[in-house]
């Protein structure tokens, strides 16, 4: 295939060049679109009509499924931008709720906008009282992600006034409800697993402090939020807020493309996030560090990770897009040290194992050659555990933070005139047509 410079492009990812593809000696011209940054895309939307062929790309390694103005990743540089702002600058200088505003509306809020947004979100933190009955239907030992999938989907049975996706005002209310209620539902899932009473939201607290009190307060004694933990968790929420077209976000978009209501779509995203190759990796990474246990055992595990037949991978290492240090992992490592210092866990043996494992892996030919670096999940488990969260809740925390990304991407999709129902094609390899055997 050849790519040619031709006519100048229209804004917003329109044609700038064209590419020529030859199929069975027939040449077809394909539009090449340019974004504001990042690789150009070859528009193959008409390819089937022109050639009778589909493209084949399992795992979407070379396929853009949408245009988006929300998040940009340069995997080779190790750069992550939300609406143009580098993730480390946002983590350092602002708070999670302001980042929610940025992701939803495209700009950082002014003071007045922030106050109004915080008031709106705060007003939606409670869930319908009848929702408590859903919780009591689960086994106490249910994984909290199972409870999240069920209960977030169930929101659509309570909030009928925000399920009409064609109504801009309803879409807006659904977005606010989702951001506001997710911490409440997550904390309820945790409390239910402990057999403790649910703790209602406290609207005098900021978003993250309120979440901490819903998780850790009990009615019988006062609970004081530790500001170091609250700030660190808020930063962790910022790091997880969006990550362009990852598996769960693509799931939300695909579910939403059929016109499904936003609560159902986010529930689908939570189900996808649960997998150990995606959001479940923080849980898996901590389990792995525990299994390794001491620095002396690290070489044995590194050897196993390099042996394909073992089926073992270093959890918290590698990424589909980052072929450099994950910029979120850098902030996460710093946050991890801050939290462990503040809580007096500086000598946490798992931190020692993690630091040494990182050091060894980054010098190992296998990891260097395959460009496998620590990702965000490598240090998040140690940090969250030190904060007092049980391991089963790690992916739930990821879901709380990612909700704004899912909802911003869902809204963008609904409002994009180019979007249609998602309907991939296939390379069929089953039996050809055959007749049912005669009796
Ligand atoms: N340990 C050992 N080898 C690895 C690892 C690892 N963690 N990750 C990738 N490889 C090898 C893999 O065996 C393959 O080798 P080869 O080319 O010889 O076949 C090569 O590196 C490329 O791997 P891949 O599976 O083709 O890459 P992918 O882009 O499909 O997978 C990944 C990306 C994140 C699923 C994978 O790196 C992985 O399984 N990592 C561990 C799980 C993890 O930490 N996931 C969290 C991702 S970040 C949070 C999020 O965004 O959800």
Image (cartoon, rainbow, N blue to C red):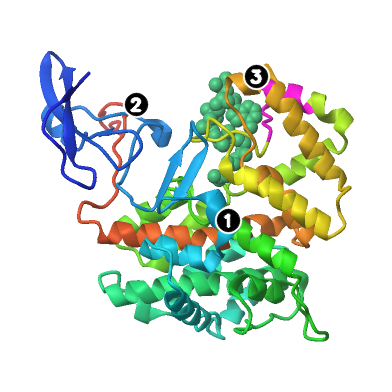
Residue drawn at point x = 24 percent, y = 52 percent:
419
Q: Is residue 21 left or right of residue 425?
A: left
Inter-mark Cα distance, 2 to 3: 35 Å
Whether disc 1's CB lies below 8 Å from ligand 1 is answered no
Query: Mark 2 falls on what kind of element?
Result: loop
Residue drawn at point x = 48 percent, y = 67 percent:
153
Q: Is residue 228 left or right of residue 308?
A: right
Whether disc 3's CB lies below 8 Å from ligand 1 is answered yes
Extent of the magenta region: 301-314
**Which of the pair 91/192 is nearer the observer?**
91
Q: Does label 1 or label 3 sit earlier along the sequence?
A: 1
Inter-mark Cα distance, 1 to 3: 32 Å
**Which of the pair 360/155 is nearer the observer?**
360
Which residue is identified by label 2? 429
Whether disc 2's CB lies below 8 Å from ligand 1 is answered no
Q: Does label 2 or label 3 sit earlier along the sequence?
A: 3
Instruction: For residue 377, say whether it is visible.
Output: yes
Label of residue 366 in the image:
3
Which residue is identified by label 1? 91
Query: Mark 3 falls on what kind of element?
Result: helix
Of labels 1 and 3, the one closer to you: 1
The answer to if 340 sits in the magenta stretch is: no
Q: Is residue 435 left or right of residue 179?
A: left
- Residue 186: image quadrant is bottom right
Q: Where is residue 301 in the image (x, y as percent from the top left)?
A: 77, 28
45 is higher (above) or lower (below) than 432: below
Residue drawn at point x = 28 percent, y = 29 percent:
55
């Amino acid at each position: 295939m050849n790519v040619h410079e031709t006519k100048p492009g229209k804004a917003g990812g329109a044609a700038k060049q064209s590419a020529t593809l030859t199929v069975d000696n027939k040449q077809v011209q394909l539009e090449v679109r340019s974004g504001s940054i990042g690789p150009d895309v070859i528009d193959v939307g008409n390819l089937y009509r022109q050639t009778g062929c589909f493209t084949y790309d399992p795992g979407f390694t070379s396929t853009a499924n949408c245009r988006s103005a929300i998040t940009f990743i340069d995997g080779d540089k190790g750069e992550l931008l939300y609406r143009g702002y580098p993730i480390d600058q946002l983590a350092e200088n602002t708070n999670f709720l302001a980042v929610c505003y940025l992701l939803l509306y495209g700009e950082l809020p002014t003071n007045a906008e922030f106050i109004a947004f915080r008031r709106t979100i705060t007003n939606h933190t409670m869930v319908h009282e009848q929702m408590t009955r859903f919780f009591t239907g689960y086994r106490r030992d249910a994984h909290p992600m199972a409870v999240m999938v069920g209960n977030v989907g169930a929101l659509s049975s309570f909030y009928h006034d925000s399920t009409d996706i064609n109504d801009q005002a309803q879409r807006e209310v659904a977005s606010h409800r989702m951001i506001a209620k997710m911490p409440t539902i997550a904390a309820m899932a945790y409390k239910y697993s402990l057999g403790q009473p649910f703790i209602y939201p406290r609207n005098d607290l900021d978003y993250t402090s309120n979440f901490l009190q819903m998780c850790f307060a009990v009615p019988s004694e006062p609970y004081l939020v530790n500001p170091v933990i609250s700030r660190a968790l808020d930063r962790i929420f910022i790091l997880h807020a969006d990550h362009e077209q990852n598996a769960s976000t693509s799931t939300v978009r695909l579910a939403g493309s059929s016109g499904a209501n936003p609560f159902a779509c986010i529930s689908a995203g939570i189900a996808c996030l649960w997998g150990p190759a995606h959001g479940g990796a923080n849980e898996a990474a901590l389990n792995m560090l525990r299994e390794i246990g001491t620095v002396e055992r690290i070489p044995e595990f590194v050897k196993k990770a390099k042996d394909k037949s073992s089926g073992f991978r270093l959890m918290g290492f590698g990424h589909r897009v980052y072929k450099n240090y994950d910029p979120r992992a850098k902030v996460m490592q710093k946050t991890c040290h801050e939290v462990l210092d503040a809580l007096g866990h500086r000598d946490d043996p798992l931190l020692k194992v993690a630091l040494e494992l990182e050091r060894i892996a980054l010098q190992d030919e296998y990891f260097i050659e395959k460009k496998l670096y620590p990702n965000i999940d490598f240090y998040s488990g140690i940090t969250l555990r030190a904060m007092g969260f049980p391991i089963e809740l790690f992916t739930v925390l990821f879901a709380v933070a990612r909700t704004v990304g899912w909802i911003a991407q869902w809204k963008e999709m609904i409002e994009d005139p180019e979007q249609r129902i998602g309907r991939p094609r296939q390379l069929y390899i089953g039996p050809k047509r055959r007749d049912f055997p005669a009796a």
